[in-house]
Every structure is written in C-alpha cells, then in structure tokens.
Image (cartoon, helix red, strand yellow):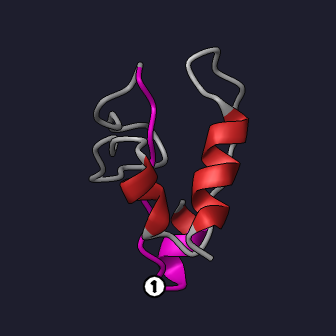
Amino acid sequence: MELLGEKDAHVDYNDPYIPVLPKMRKYSFNNSSVPLHAETLAKYDAVVIATEHADYDPDFILKKFKAYR
C-alpha cells in the first residue's frame, strides 16, 4: 500500500475483520474497509488478493472484476 501510494495510486482494501486500519509502528494509513460488491470491484484497475479468508470467494472476485473489462 505504501509503495503504490508513493506512485500516486489510490489504494483501498477490504477486510471483514479489520474495518479501519490501525496505526502501526512503521505505517499509518488513513483507510477504512470498502464493501466487496460487484459495483465496487468494477471501479478498480487492479485487484490484489493478499490472503485467503473463508469469507472470500475468489471466483466471484475475479468474475466480477473481469466482467467490467
């Protein structure tokens, strides 16, 4: 997130267990979790799945993200 932000990228995240990113020793992001809906996925140029949650359906994410391309 830090590296992308340095390149002026707009970075969002979704995590059902972390609604707001806490301040950490090295990082301090001012982000809140965004909903994971087809409409939300449609607005992004890239999607990164960085962890495997049982709450996530990777097929849904890929299908809805690609559906708008």
- What type is the residue that disc 1 sits on? Asp
Q: Is residue 34 left or right of residue 64?
A: left
Give the image location of residue 39, x and y in percent.
37, 57
* Residue that appears at 50% across and 69% down: 44
Magenta-span inclusion, residue 56: no
Give the image location of residue 55, x and y in percent.
56, 18
Query: Which residue is nearer to you in this view: 47 or 29?
Result: 47
Image quadrant where one finds the N terminus: bottom right
Q: Is residue 37 left or right of residue 54?
A: left
Give the image location of residue 27, x and y in percent.
45, 49
Q: In the displayed image of the protein, which residue is found farthest to the front?
A: 67
Q: Quadrant of residue 8?
A: bottom left
Disc 1 crowd rating (10 Å Cα; few below 14, some 14-19, many 20+) is few
Q: Quadrant of residue 15?
A: top left
| Residue range (magenta) | 3-16
Above or below 28: residue 23? above
Magenta-span inclusion, residue 6: yes
Above or below 5: residue 11? above
Query: Which residue is nearer to you in this view: 43 or 27?
Result: 43
- Mark 1: secondary structure: loop
* Residue that appears at 70% across and 32% down: 51
Find disc 1 in the rendering and name its residue: 8
Main secondary structure type of the part rendered in magenta: loop
Query: Which residue is nearer to you in this view: 1 or 55?
Result: 55
Q: Is residue 42 left or right of residue 40?
A: right
